[in-house]
Image (spheres, rainbow, N blue to C red):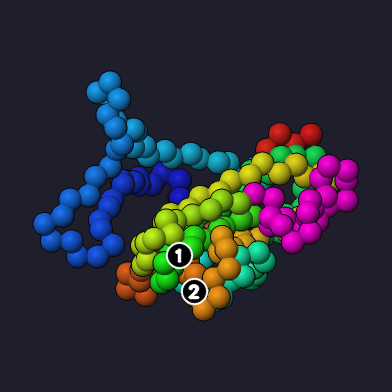
Amino acid sequence: MTANTTYSLKLQWKTNRRASGATIFAGAGPIAGAFSPTRLVLQFIPAGTGLTDRHSESQYTFPSSNGTEWKPMDPTNLSLTVMPGMTCLAIVSVNADLWTANAGFNQDVGIAVSGGTAPGATYPTVPGQPEAWKESGGFAGTFSPNAAYVQGVIPVAAGAYTFQVVWKANKDASGATLFDAAGPIGTRYSPTRLTVQLISCS
């Protein structure tokens, strides 16, 4: 954003396809008259405070995942290397719209980390495995993107660390395909994002 410029931000929504006569809702509940909150938050982070971000508006596919091996989603555009000069905590987050054309399995997304030499801050912790991950989706549904979000707090020390978005199926999916990113609207797909913020540095 540019200084001394007015910006307007708002939440918008729609169905993923034409749904004549149907209604979509926001807010679960109620419990004692209150529904689950819908929230819009804006946080300004000063330049030079260790926030790094990569995103892609491409769509990705992963055919025939064996359900065990994690694969980088995009080693070029969804990978970040940071070089802290001291001991810090890295808050790492990934957002991805995951879906499948085939029923029967879910999609896993994770944060893979490599690098470091200091005790307690050397990765990967387990070779071939991400440091944080989540399972996304409902295995019975198809062509319905699920906005998956995963976050991890990773101790780092002085040195170089590489963070990547990785994914797989939750079980053997031979002959089926995982997808990431909804759309397109025009030529753009929903962004897949990798963000790293260094905090508590000392």
Question: Does the stretch in magenta take in 154?
Answer: no
Q: Which residues are magenta?
A: 112-132
| Disc on res. 177 | 2
From the top left corner, tell me how far across and down residue 122 is, in percent. 83, 50
Side of 43 where 68 appears, left or right: right
What residue is rendered at 61% in x and 56% in y?
110
Image quadrant of residue 63? bottom right
| Relative to 184, 57 lies left or right | right
Q: Residues within 10 Å of mark 1 (few under 14, many from 20)?
A: some
Under circle 1, the secondary element is: loop
Which residue is situated farthest in the left direction here? Answer: 21
- Residue at coordinates 37% horizontally, 66% vertically from top-left? 142
**Residue that label 1 marks:** 104
Query: At numbered mark 2, what does the secondary structure look like: helix, strand or loop?
Result: strand
x 42%, y 56%: residue: 138
> Mark 2 or 1 closer to N-term?
1
